[in-house]
């Protein structure tokens, strides 16, 4: 991976993982698979090639994921909550701890960070990019680790972005906020094909222009379904621009036909799938309960109150696997995404969440555990509410 200076940006990669062919009748019990695992299962991999004080990898180098020309960690960090007061309760007094969050995950081998020019509510619009750029510059570790970081940002399909040049301008705006000269990955945040097809063509052209002008090292999309993904892939291919990543809502509660079809298509085309919301906004953490009145504030609380009773069998199974593994439900849910061949990007608002997320690395769910989780997820009558910007 080409070395990055402090004024550069970063990216993600892909792993291919065949769909399990096990039917529910063939699901092997976790106890059986657990008996086949070595005594050290579930423990983080030994630190490999420390590059500075406290810097280490919590995973094997062989687990790095190829994303275009880049190699990224098997898990990244999403920064949707940084600057978002409405849904995540962000406050500027959190910035010091967020820098510590960034430092912690980087020291432990996380090298890919996802953001967007629309992240941040109200006057804080763009705050996520500003914070991320600041944290990269102020990282106290080695230059070798800092220069190997990858930032991927997304350009919103605002209604006034109707020309290719508007996308190029948006990219340059993100670079200014991040304090970088080049992004590792530039992504279209969503497709307008369903409601403004002509704008979609301009967005695609603008993304290709960003690549050709050297503003980004790789390009990707977000919230594109298989149909639209094939279209933009064909267009970019004609211009000699490789489509490197596709970001989609992907978790045990967002693993329906849409996600499975997109994953299969990406495997065929050599595109890395980035899994956002791998914890289903927190439902899969096991921390919330309607019966005990433990619900988050705001719109998430309303959603959880409706959904938790319907998905209880899956939440309980995730907790059961976690107990047997000596892990937390969050770690199991994130590890499941990795086992599916995606690069999950869970968020972290504080050090407690960041440390817990890191515990998803250095081990792997067994085939039997994955199959049982799959079967239970498939049996649910309800799943996570899908992003309204997701296309077919």
Image: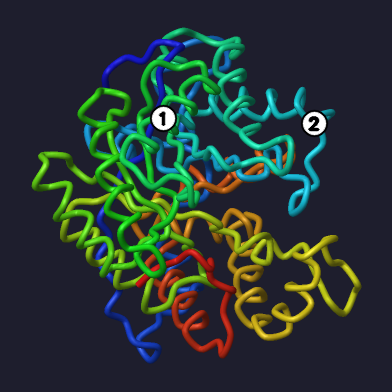
Q: Position of residue 181 (x, y in %)?
A: 39, 16
Q: Residue at x 61, y 20 (%)?
A: 135
Quarter of the figure with the C terminus: bottom left
Q: Earlier in the sequence, mark 1 or mark 2?
A: 2
Q: Residue at x 45, y 42 (%)?
A: 154
Give me the disc on residue 94.
2
Near-viewer residue (241 or 326): 241
Q: Whole-percent x and y of residue 342?
A: 37, 54
Is residue 111 toward the left or the right of residue 317 in the image? Answer: left
Q: Please identify, in this view, whether the residue under mark 1 or under mark 2 is nearer the observer.
A: 1
- Residue ranking furthest to the right: 293
Label 2, residues with CA under 10 Å away: few <14, some 14-19, many ≥20: few
Q: Can the viewer see residue 60 in this picture? A: no
Say whether residue 49 is left or right of residue 100.
left
Q: Residue 128 falls in which quadrant of the image?
A: top right
Camera sees residue 26: yes
**Residue placed most toward the observer, 28 or 95:** 95
What is the secondary structure assignment of the residue under circle 1? Answer: helix
Q: Secondary structure at mark 2?
A: helix
Q: Is 291 above or below relative to 11?
A: below
Quarter of the image containing the N terminus?
A: top left
Percent of width and height locating residue 319: 66, 68
Residue 136 x %, y %:
55, 18
Image point 30% across, 32% down: which residue? 71
**Position of 49 relative to 202 (above/below):** above
Tag 1–tag 2 contact (CB < 8 Å): no
**Residue drawn at (41%, 53%) of the image:** 222
The residue singled out by tag 1 in the image is 169
Total marks placed? 2
Q: Nearer the viewer, residue 295 or 220?
A: 220
Residue 287 lies in quadrant: bottom right
């Amino acid at each position: 991976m080409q070395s990055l200076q402090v004024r550069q940006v970063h990216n993600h990669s892909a792993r291919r993982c065949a769909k399990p062919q096990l039917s529910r009748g063939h699901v092997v019990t976790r106890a059986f698979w657990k008996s086949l695992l070595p005594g050290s299962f579930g423990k983080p991999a030994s630190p490999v090639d420390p590059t500075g004080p406290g810097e280490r990898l919590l995973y094997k180098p062989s687990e790095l994921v190829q994303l275009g020309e880049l190699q990224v960690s098997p898990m990244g960090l999403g920064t949707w909550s940084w600057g978002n007061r409405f849904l995540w309760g962000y406050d500027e007094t959190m910035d010091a701890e967020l820098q510590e969050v960034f430092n912690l995950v980087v020291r432990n081998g996380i090298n890919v960070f996802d953001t967007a020019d629309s992240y941040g509510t109200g006057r804080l619009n763009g705050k996520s990019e500003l914070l991320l750029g600041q944290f990269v510059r102020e990282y106290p570790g080695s230059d070798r680790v800092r220069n190997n970081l990858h930032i991927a940002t997304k350009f919103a399909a605002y209604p006034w972005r109707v020309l290719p040049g508007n996308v190029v301008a948006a990219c340059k705006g993100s670079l200014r906020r991040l304090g970088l000269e080049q992004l590792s990955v530039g992504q279209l945040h969503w497709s307008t094909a369903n409601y403004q097809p002509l704008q979609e063509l301009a967005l695609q052209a603008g993304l290709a222009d960003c690549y050709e002008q050297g503003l980004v090292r790789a390009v990707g999309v977000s919230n594109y379904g298989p149909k639209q993904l094939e279209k933009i892939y064909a267009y970019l291919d004609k211009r000699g621009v490789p489509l490197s990543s596709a970001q989609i809502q992907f978790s045990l509660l967002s693993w329906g036909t849409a996600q499975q079809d997109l994953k299969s298509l990406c495997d065929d085309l050599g595109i890395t799938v980035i899994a956002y919301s791998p914890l289903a906004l927190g439902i899969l953490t096991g921390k919330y309960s309607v019966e005990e009145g433990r619900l988050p504030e705001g719109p998430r609380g309303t959603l959880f109150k409706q959904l938790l009773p319907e998905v209880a069998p899956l939440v309980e199974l995730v907790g059961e696997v976690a107990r047997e593994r000596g892990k937390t439900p969050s770690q199991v849910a994130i590890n499941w995404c990795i086992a599916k061949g995606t690069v999950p990007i869970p968020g972290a608002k504080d050090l407690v969440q960041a440390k817990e997320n890191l515990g998803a690395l250095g081990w792997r769910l067994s085939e039997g555990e994955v199959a049982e989780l799959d079967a239970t997820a498939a049996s649910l009558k309800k799943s996570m509410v899908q992003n309204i910007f997701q296309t077919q």
